[in-house]
Amino acid sequence: MEQHVKERIRKQYGNLTASQKIISKIAIEKPGLLAIHTAKKIAELTNTSEATVIRFCYALGYSGYTELQDEIKKSLLIGEQKKGPFQKYRDSEDTLSRDNFAHQVIESDIAYLQQSLQQIDYRLLQQAIDHIIRANRIVVVGFRWCHIPAKWLFSSLNAIKGNTHLYIGAVDNADYFLTERDQEWLVIAISFPRHPSETVALVHSAKELGAKILAITEGELSPISQAADLLLKITTPQPVATSGMPTLFSILNVLIKGVMVHDSENVQKRLQHYDEISSKLYSFVGDEEDDYSIF
């Protein structure tokens, strides 16, 4: 919490009633509770009254509970940006309850998406999009839980660009790296702690064969970062598998939309062809009444 909130409580603490001091302790130790709950709920949690909560706000110089709550929300967002992902996850674990979990989970997702928006390096993002557009062949790799976003990215790129492979490990035949080395290959590797050795091995092998590497991971010390031509860092709550998916998928969606914007003519032709072929191969409910597009 920003210092001025704690400072107000510190300066006024001696003038607070016993009940107000209980509320002040919650405000300092678990400000997230005030950020997401009404004054009535805070009164229930502290075994006081709603009027006491309002008077507590007045005692600190606020016009009411809403002003105090807004200030805490702003300060928490600033504080979230300064903390490490593990601490953020621990903090959310401390305050999650049956009463507030839905609100807090979605609010946490929004906060991380806002943080990602502020941290986007548009120069690197444009380079990543250009690499995707220029590549003759693309391989997407992601193992364990990263296989889920990797498969989505592979499917989306195959729809709007084509010539995209999903590397699935030892059962996959990766001879295309050897037989088509004259092509410009791009490997998009998605990996977060704990990093699977298969992903690291594929990245280094592809690099030795001349492929370009786009690494999507947590930072410069990631084991796939050293071999990467481009690094897209993504800060997510930990563990990523259960808490970080919204942020990860949002960045992947930015890449897809970026290709659609910067290579719109080719993408539109590809999507039209895709729709024509898929309508012949597959049967969809409502084909006669509606015109559906995959994007």
Image (cartoon, grey):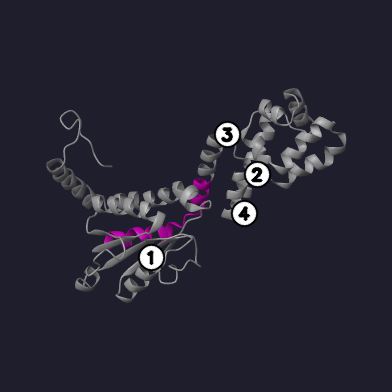
Residue located beneath label 3 in the image: 98
Q: Determine the CA span between mark 3 and mark 2.
A: 25 Å
Determine which residue is flagged by label 2: 75
Upstream in sequence: badge 3 or badge 2: 2
State the image coordinates of residue 209 (x, y, percent, origin top left): 29, 75
Count of numbered circles on the image: 4
The kind of secondary structure element at disc 4 is helix
Q: CA distance from mark 1 to mark 4?
A: 30 Å
**Residue in the picture at 62% in, 54% down:** 82
Q: Tell me if residue 7 can be seen.
A: yes
Q: Are marks 2 and 1 in contact (CB under 8 Å)?
A: no
- As measured in the structure, the alpha-carbon distance from the residue carrying label 4 to the one carrying label 3 is 28 Å
Q: Magenta segment, which residues? A: 112-134
As drawn, the residue found furthest toward the bottom would be 208
The stretch drawn in magenta includes residue 120: yes
- Three-letter residue code for mark 2: Ser
Q: Nearer the viewer, residue 282 or 53?
A: 282
Using a 10 Å C-alpha cutoff, classify the residue at mark 2 as few (fewer than 14 neighbours), some (14 to 19) or many (20 or more). some
First in residue order: circle 4 vs circle 3: 4
